[in-house]
Amino acid sequence: MRTIVLVGLMGIANSAFAVSVEEAYRLIPHQRTIFQSASARMPAAERAYLVAFFSAIDQAIVAKVSARRETTVAEAYRPVWKAWEQLNPPTALKGAQDKVKAAIMDQQAFLLEIENKQSSWNMGHRKIRSSSANLREAYGELMRIYSSENASNKQAFFDYLCALDFV
């Protein structure tokens, strides 16, 4: 039930922005492969968590794109952190969730520096490098934990985290 409510609330949050999830992927540009929970080879609780987790990542992708356009960084990231508060990872996925959260925090901080004209677009910026490293580590954890997952869902793991990455 919590997952269904969360996904519903995220849809409402998306409508507040001019950018949809689909448009954000096109503007990055990056392929979007949606996690297929029905065909996933994992326990139901982990499937439900990953649906919410990837939806929260989509919110972060929308925030990243929106903050580069007409929306302030604070406004763009507000729905991300509301979604993040609802996540309750299984023990095995806590590390991956923490790494993705750290990556999003770094991205938000970088975009805030840009917004406040304290930095310029430098893909070598320490926050960008740190974010990217955390996302690569989170991907490695997902692939290790779900090494027997089907090819489509493995591609989804890559696409969600790669689309979130600046690099």
Image: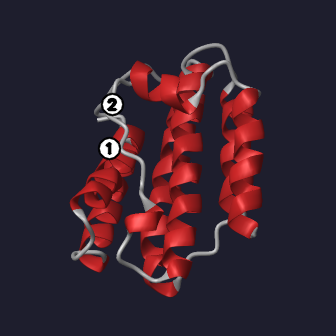
| 140 over 119 or under it: above or below | below
Image coords of residue 152 (percent x, y): 27, 55
Q: Is mark 1 on a helix, strand or loop?
A: helix
* Residue at the spot 70% in from the left edge and 45% down from the top edge: 10
Which dot marks residue 162? 1
Which dot marks residue 30? 2
| 111 over 87 or under it: above or below | above
C-alpha distance separating marks 2 and 1: 8 Å
* Image quadrant containing the N terminus: bottom right
Specify whether residue 133 is in view: no
| 30 over 11 or under it: above or below | above
- Three-letter code for the amino acid on which mark 2 is drawn: His
Task: Tell me, yes or no, whether the two marked residues, 2 and 1, touch with CB atoms within 8 Å.
Answer: yes
* Residue at the spot 32% in from the left edge and 59% down from the top edge: 153
Q: Quadrant of residue 118?
A: top right
Q: In which quarter of the image is residue 29?
A: top left
Q: Which of 167 and 36 is in front in this view?
A: 36
